[in-house]
Image (cartoon, grey):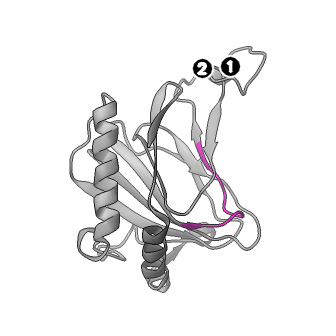
Amino acid sequence: MFIQPLFPTPLGFYELEASLADDIEAKVVSRLNLLDYKQNETYTDYYKDNKLFELEKELPVLHSFIFDCRNHYLNETAFTGSSDIQYWFQDYRTKEAVHHLHHHGIHGISGVYWVRANENAGEFRMENPNPLCNYAEVSDRNNYFTQDYASVHPKKGLLILFPAYLKHEVLAGNKNIERTTLAFNFGKN
């Protein structure tokens, strides 16, 4: 586990043990046909009252992992987040499936857990929270202090945590995409 300063915003990286990630993937994939279709070939239960899973009861290993990561993140940073979790599953089924730039409010922390992802899955991109950074004249946009954005390539069993205000998006993938996530928030939206 580690915290990576980013823009200088803390981004927490956590990996679930491979055998546990495999078990969670099998359970979630078996229910993906219950997700509602939304635009751009993305399937989600974000809009449903009846979630795909009751996280605490049906996926207790994942629930505990998320809360352990949350506790570590809060202990290592000055951010706060309630113990109330709002979560939703999403399945991206085509290379055109994207999730445009957005944030989850100004309070609390947010996260993404990759239930499954292959090499064709679109990256998770976070925008520098300094709105003026991309206007500055710099010699290298990839420098830690001047980059406009940072990306994480999806990986099964990977969980990331970040402040809810951090703007982020899901980029288009390639053919034969496999990308299923559990996104969540702790705190006010």
Q: Residues within 10 Å of mark 2 (few under 14, many from 20)?
A: few
* Residue 42 colored in magenta in the image: no
Residue 12: % across, % down: 44, 41
Which residue corresponds to the image point at 57% horizontal and 40% vertical from the top-left?
Answer: 126
Inspect the image, locate mark 2, and give the three-letter code of the amino acid beneath it: Leu
Which residue corresponds to the image point at 74% horizontal and 14% vertical from the top-left?
Answer: 137
Q: Is residue 183 left or right of residue 129?
A: left
Inspect the image, locate mark 1, and give the three-letter code of the amino acid beneath it: Tyr
Q: Is residue 108 at all visible to an observer of this figure? A: no
* Residue 123 colored in magenta in the image: yes
Which residue corresponds to the image point at 46% horizontal and 58% vertical from the top-left?
Answer: 113
Residue 164: % across, % down: 39, 41
In this view, the residue in front, 147 or 59, is 59
| Residue beneath disc 2 | 132
Please report the bounds of the magenta region as a residue range. Answer: 116-125
Residue 22: % across, % down: 49, 73
Q: Residue furthest left?
A: 83
Proximity of marks 1 and 2: CB atoms separated by less than 8 Å: yes
